[in-house]
Amino acid sequence: MGTDDAAGLGIQVAYAAGTLTVTLTGEVDLDSVAGLHQAMEEAHAPWGTRVVIDLSGVAFMDSAGIHALLTCYELAQDRGGSLSVTGAHGVVERVLHLSGTLTLFRPPPPGGTRPGLN
């Protein structure tokens, strides 16, 4: 599945080997997060899937983007899976760091687990 919405967010979704990869390009902000939510809802990955959101092509993210990532994180957990974020750089990495979510979205260490949002 690939979409490019009018708000400037490109979304590519691919499923392989137990991992759902969501690659984002452009800006993740109030105008574009609906597309991310829709892509996650429509991704018919099996129960327990590992979700990776690749932000290497994202130039900007605001608090609505962080909220969208947290919602996707909870959705993945509700489905018995996990969610991690890769490729955050520059302003996007700084926003995730300042919000305290960067460590939450990092992949768990091999054999390790991360705490939930509870």
Image (cartoon, helix red, strand yellow):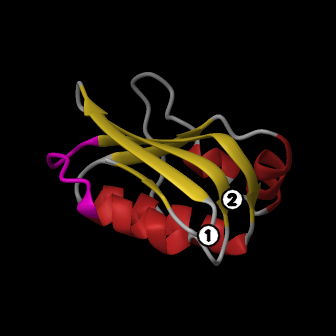
Q: Which residue is mark 1?
A: 7
Residue 93 is left or right of residue 9, and the answer is right
Query: Residue 16 at what x, y percent from top left?
Result: 25, 28
Mark 1 vs mark 2: which is more N-terminal?
A: 1
Position of residue 4 measured from the top left corner of the image (x, y, whole percent):
50, 56
Which residue is pictured at 29% across the width and 48% down the height? 81
Return the residue found at the far front: 6
Mark 1 Cα shell of 10 Å, populated few (<14), some (14-19), many (≥20): some
Q: Please name the residue that numbered disc 2 is placed on.
A: 27
Q: Quadrant of residue 64?
A: bottom right
Secondary-structure class at tag 2: strand
Would residue 44 be counted in the magenta stretch?
yes
Q: Is residue 71 above or below residue 40?
A: below
Q: Toward which corner of the image does residue 79 lie, by quadrant? A: bottom left
Question: What percent of the width, then of the height, locates residue 106?
Answer: 58, 39
Which region of the structure is painted magenta?
Answer: 42-49
What distance separates the C-alpha of mark 1 from that of mark 2?
Answer: 8 Å
- Per the image, is 43 magenta? yes
| Nearer the camera: disc 1 or disc 2 | 1
The quarter of the image holding the C terminus is bottom left
Q: Are marks 1 and 2 in contact (CB under 8 Å)?
A: yes
**Residue placed at 68% from the left, 49% from the top?**
102
Q: Secondary structure at mark 1?
A: loop
Judged left or right of residue 8, residue 12 is left
Disc ID at residue 111: none
